[in-house]
Amino acid sequence: MALKKKPVTGMKDMLPREMEIRDYVIQMIKDTYRTFGFSSMETPCVEHIENLLSKQGGENEQLIFKILKRGAKLNLETASCEADLVDGGLRYDLTLPLSRYYANHANELPSPFKALQIGNVWRADRPQRGRFRQFMQCDIDILGEASNLAEIELILATSTLLGKLDFKNFTIRINDRRILKAMAAYSGFPEDSYDEVFIILDKMDKIGLEGVETELKEAGYGQEKVDKYLELFKEVTNDLAGIRYLKEKLGSFLDQEVADGLSMIISSVEETKEAEFKMSFDPTLVRGMSYYTGTIFEISMDEFGGSVGGGGRYDKMIGKFTGQETPACGFSIGFERIVMLLLESGYQVPTQKEKKAFLIEKGMPEQGIVKILALAKEEREQGKQVMIANMKKNKKFQKEQLAQEGYTDVKECFVREFLPEE
Amino acid sequence: MALKKKPVTGMKDMLPREMEIRDYVIQMIKDTYRTFGFSSMETPCVEHIENLLSKQGGENEQLIFKILKRGAKLNLETASCEADLVDGGLRYDLTLPLSRYYANHANELPSPFKALQIGNVWRADRPQRGRFRQFMQCDIDILGEASNLAEIELILATSTLLGKLDFKNFTIRINDRRILKAMAAYSGFPEDSYDEVFIILDKMDKIGLEGVETELKEAGYGQEKVDKYLELFKEVTNDLAGIRYLKEKLGSFLDQEVADGLSMIISSVEETKEAEFKMSFDPTLVRGMSYYTGTIFEISMDEFGGSVGGGGRYDKMIGKFTGQETPACGFSIGFERIVMLLLESGYQVPTQKEKKAFLIEKGMPEQGIVKILALAKEEREQGKQVMIANMKKNKKFQKEQLAQEGYTDVKECFVREFLPEE
């Protein structure tokens, strides 16, 4: 037969060992975020193609898995371009569908609405190690809360979750788009150059201050602007003093409330956090998504080179659906990276209950089977994981296999023990 | 803006109230099936189009959401038919992907392999009340177990789950494809007419014995065959005696082991079941999927007209991928119907923890916020669900809204109480 055994390119079959960790992490996410007042919600995996291509998704719009029209709507004869052929696509993130959902259901939802979404998203990226074309995202968002309470709760909830999964000594870096802009404005960059400047600034951790200087000059910006800009980064520190420095230095370029708000978020989180981590002000943090309007944040972990989560405020996006601006702020954890780190570290799921196996000798009469089922029932009612299997010829190998799955308590059931009473 | 607010046709946004029940049912499924030794596994939602169209899926193959090729592989100029345009599709069930998965990973999996899958599937069905184009399926399958232990464990696990969700007095009807065939053979129907005969027989519960007689005759079958066939259904009972009757009557048309096996499954389950339900032998049970080879079963519930789950043995399917036959048996519960029944009955999720809300008066200084966050932290550490929100002008309305969400314990935090100590 010509059936294909491998999963489709770039996607992944999940084996039981990985699923055990995934299930555990998902349950921990639900339990933890629930204590912070987040409610589960879900949107369909398929989204209107018009919404997916509405320029909210940046580069992800190039990576959409598109869905063919069906039935009479599909006309190959007259179709002259892709748009004639498709009417939907698989969502590439959970933020755009959340905006649509909120626009559709705002009057059925509390305000503020604290949403928890756990779901797959799809991007037709070039396949590479550890990155898949279907992957799970896990987002919390607070819609309708303009104050910094949103940022504080999002950061506390996320860090508490990571702490419960035994992650320590991570850093949550925070910045504000408005600080980014004020620093550029103060240095004399014209507004239409910000995007380019920030793309270069974003490389600071890789190419350093000198590299940024070189690239800015290569992009044609004058020495004076570049010097003034980099001077700020030389002086600023990654703490509350750094924010105070910028607040003074940038003067009227920066709304004082922005600086005060950022300080307040950092100090409130530091004083009430549960997990072992630190907050760090990072004026070089850019984050790519164009929809952010205020605070932006990202989780860095020493064990793992890159970011394991991030988010920020996007106050303008929901208005694009509703016509009415709604403050919004979200935090997404890198579910797949977290699972990968746990898998690679040999993480043992702590809730794992005792496992017991019954092996049934060949020829067991029905009464014997019933007795074994009754024994298993008792154990199962206590929450124990019970396997019942027919004894194989190579019993030693069978028991080794069961032990690998964690069934160390094996009861061999021989026919002679289970013969019906006379 | 032209953004669309509604979900795509036939698919559904999940509101928090429904999600609470869905999350609860999913957790109960995982907990219960785990005690029966099932392991979670997952396949990608996207499957090779060749596999989806391999004639395993019957009518579902007409309902596939197909995915457009991407990049250089897509050539609109030269495409003359749909097949030139697509390379994948959304899975329409979990059984076909399970077969591919097992073929791909058999040497990494235990034998027998007890698999639990919970996942969305997609079918471009005509939209109708209560049926959606994206819906959750929940399947357990035992691969590599030829004995009736598979059927017994599947039925016990599924019925135990339903019992834990407070369903009572349901019936699990069971039959065997080989009994269906033996009854038709005994009555003189030629083998190539079985499919047509069974489609008519399947309507027994709607059109009755007389209706079946009429339709069989209309289809051109002779009076003698039809009489002989219907005589069997008049005499047979829905219990072990019914199976004994057929065993004698059908003689060499029916393998005696099939009848004995079915009796053994029914009596073993009856003697060891945990939930309140009954097993019923139903020789009119057909089930549509063409891949079943042996036992077939279905759950009927009085509260709900139709089936809320079903399954059976499909010993030939995995061989189509691997070239090596592997015994397989599965049971799928109607997740969406179960959720719908629970929702409509006003089901209260029993694990719901206490909920507490803090309302913060406008103008609260940072020290006050920190104190409130610390109070919330204590409650959250005890597993309580805690909402922190800014007090609104219409506090009465806000508290009513919170009460609707279950936040009846509301602490109002006034600035005067939380002033910093001098």
Image (spheres, coloured by chain):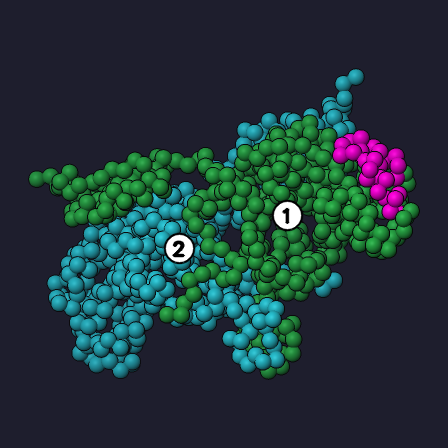
Chain colours: A cyan, B green
Residue at image location 83% in from the left, 35% down from the top: B235
Q: Which residues are magenta?
A: B225-250
Res. A298 image quadrant: bottom left
Position of residue B120 measured from the top left corner of the image (x, y, whole percent)? 55, 53
Amino acid type, residue under disc 2 in the picture? His
Q: Is residue A236 left or right of residue A211?
A: left
Q: Establish if A309 lies above or below B241.
A: below
Observer-nearest residue: A49 or B300?
B300
Q: Per the image, is A179 magenta?
A: no
Amino acid type, residue under disc 1 in the picture? Leu
On what subunit does the disc labeled 2 rest?
A
Label 2 neighbour load within 10 Å: few <14, some 14-19, many 20+: some
- Discs 1 and 2 share one subunit: no
Observer-nearest residue: A332 or A210?
A332
Observer-nearest residue: A388 or A166?
A388
Q: Which residue is mark 2?
A: A105
Position of residue B307 measured from the top left corner of the image (x, y, whole percent)? 64, 44
Q: Of helix, strand and loop, which one carries label 1?
A: loop
Residue at image location 15% in from the left, 38% down from the top: B417
Q: Establish if A181 lies above or below B195.
A: below
Q: Which residue is mark 1?
A: B109
The answer to whether one can see residue A129 in this image is no
